[in-house]
Amino acid sequence: MSITRINERTLLAMPITNETVSTVLPAVCETVAENNIYDVIIDFSNVELLTSSNVSNLILLRQTLKEAGNRLILSSVSLPTKCIFTVTGLNDYFTFVKDRTEALNSLQFDNCN
């Protein structure tokens, strides 16, 4: 598990796997709670399934980030995982992008505006 600071405003959590997602999400939440200056990108390229606890952690993380004026971007989300968000009605609650490059470009574009 790795939480990497890409720049002064962005954290990247990767690689997330089915086995590590339950420990990575709380660690990211803790980092963000201590330093409300980060946008967060989470790479889901190795995740096939999420538990209700994982979804709850993502909701809490997004709320914390949004309250601080920051963003959460989920990249490389597989179709089965994306279906979990759709079935729960959360697909419009989160920002999904194709990959980490698109996530970084999205943040760069937003920070320029």
Image (cartoon, rainbow, N blue to C red):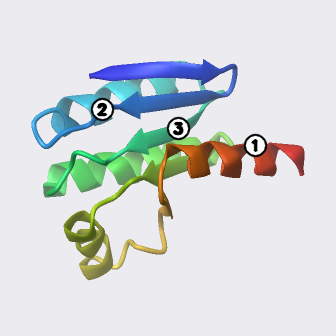
Q: Which residue is drawn at 51% across and 44% down?
A: 100
Seen in the picture, residue 34 relative to 18 is either above or below; the reply is: above
Q: Which residue is drawn at 17% across and 37% down?
A: 22
Seen in the picture, residue 22 relative to 7 is either above or below; the reply is: below
Nearer to me, 93 or 113: 113
Which mark is first along the chain, 3 or 2? Answer: 2
Which mark is first along the chain, 3 or 1? Answer: 3
Badge 3 is on which residue? Answer: 40
Q: Distance between the residues labelled 1 and 3?
A: 13 Å
Which mark is first along the chain, 1 or 2? Answer: 2
Q: Residue at x 49, y 26 (%)?
A: 33
Label 2 Cα neighbours within 10 Å, binned few <14 / some 14-19 / many ≥20: some
Q: How far apart are marks 2 and 1 (CA)?
A: 22 Å
Camera-near label (1 vs 3) is 1
Label 3 Cα neighbours within 10 Å, binned few <14 / some 14-19 / many ≥20: many
Most distant residue in the right direction? 113
Badge 2 is on which residue? Answer: 15
The local secondary structure at tag 2 comes to: loop
Circles 2 and 1: CB distance less than 8 Å?
A: no
Percent from the top left, x then y, of residue 75? 44, 51
Circles 2 and 3: CB distance less than 8 Å?
A: no
Q: Which residue is drawn at 68% across and 52% down?
A: 106
Query: Looking at the picture, which amino acid does disc 3 mark?
Result: Val
Query: Looking at the picture, which amino acid does disc 2 mark?
Result: Pro
Percent from the top left, x then y, of residue 43? 38, 42
Seen in the picture, residue 6 relative to 92 is either above or below; the reply is: above
Nearer to me, 29 or 48: 48
Badge 1 is on which residue? Answer: 108
Camera-near label (2 vs 3) is 2
Q: Is residue 106 left or right of residue 43?
A: right
Identify the image quadrant of residue 1.
top left
Query: Looking at the picture, which amino acid does disc 1 mark?
Result: Gln
